[in-house]
Amino acid sequence: MPISVIAGVKATRMELLALKKKKQLAQKGYELLKEKRDALIMEFFRLIEDVKELRDKLQEDLAQAFQNLKYAKMIDGPLKLYSLASSIKPTLNLEVETHNVMGVKMPKLNIISQNGEGAQHSLIGFSSKTDDAKRYFKNALDTIIKLAEIEGSVKRLAEEIEKSKRRVNALKFIVIPRIEATINYIELHLEEAEREDFTRLKFIKRKLSEK
């Protein structure tokens, strides 16, 4: 598909110089956007690896938590554990912030308070398995929050990568080729005008010499 020239452009030397400068700026913008896109892609895959590691950690923490909970039920008894769980008011307060990574606003989740008044509930009189189960469930919750933060960042990075790809492709396949096509059009027009002027001058000189 042939690239069309920029509409409304005058075939003058001033316009030619302006277009050549515009082409340089477009090429510089293309290189910068390409570098940004590549950096975003690298960060994207780094975070994907973090997500995989955190998911593995979450599975391990939950497996340990339920394993210790099973032993705690055997040692402390289900009624005693139910009484403990009922006495704790489950609350979780999060603060959502954003931080800037290469122009992309990424979410950051901070735990303000956790488990409310029951957070310091005494486990005196309970087996170590109950304490271990509590610890692993706490670890799992922290991992879930971190996962939510990173997966949110991955989503935003993916969106920004798509935007960068569209901009890079637009510059590479539309903007710069149209500028180049317009430059070629003006150069051809100016060359043709020069040839016509030269022919006209030769004709005038010949006519003058015949007199």
Image (cartoon, rainbow, N blue to C red):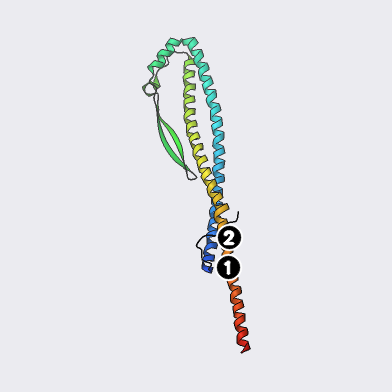
Q: Nearer the viewer, residue 125 or 110?
A: 110
What residue would you read off at disc 1?
189
Q: Position of residue 111 (x, y in %)?
A: 42, 30
- SS label for mark 2: helix
The residue sitting at 54% across, 20% down in the picture is 63
Q: Left or right: 81 with respect to 31?
A: left
The residue sitting at 39% across, 16% down in the picture is 86
Q: Left or right: 112 with respect to 158?
A: left
Q: Is residue 176 above or below residue 191?
A: above
The residue sitting at 47% across, 18% down in the picture is 131
| The C terminus, quarter of image | bottom right
Q: Is residue 22 above or below residue 100?
A: below
Q: Residue furthest bottom?
A: 211
Q: Is residue 185 above or below residue 59?
A: below
The amino acid at mark 1 is: His
Q: Position of residue 164 (x, y in %)?
A: 53, 46
Q: Report which quarter residue 79 is drawn in.
A: top left
Q: Residue furthest left?
A: 117
The residue sitting at 55% across, 44% down in the picture is 39
Q: Position of residue 88 (x, y in %)?
A: 39, 19
Q: Report which quarter residue 124 is drawn in.
A: top left
The amino acid at mark 2 is: Ala
Q: Nearer the viewer, residue 163 or 203?
A: 203
Asked whether residue 125 is in view, the answer is no
Determine crowd level at label 2: few under 14, some 14-19, many 20+ residues with C-alpha closer than 10 A.
Answer: some
Name the disc covering residue 181, or none.
2
Q: Position of residue 156 (x, y in %)?
A: 49, 39
- SS label for mark 1: helix
Question: How much space separates mark 2 and mark 1, taking CA atoms?
Answer: 12 Å
Asked whether residue 46 is in view, the answer is yes
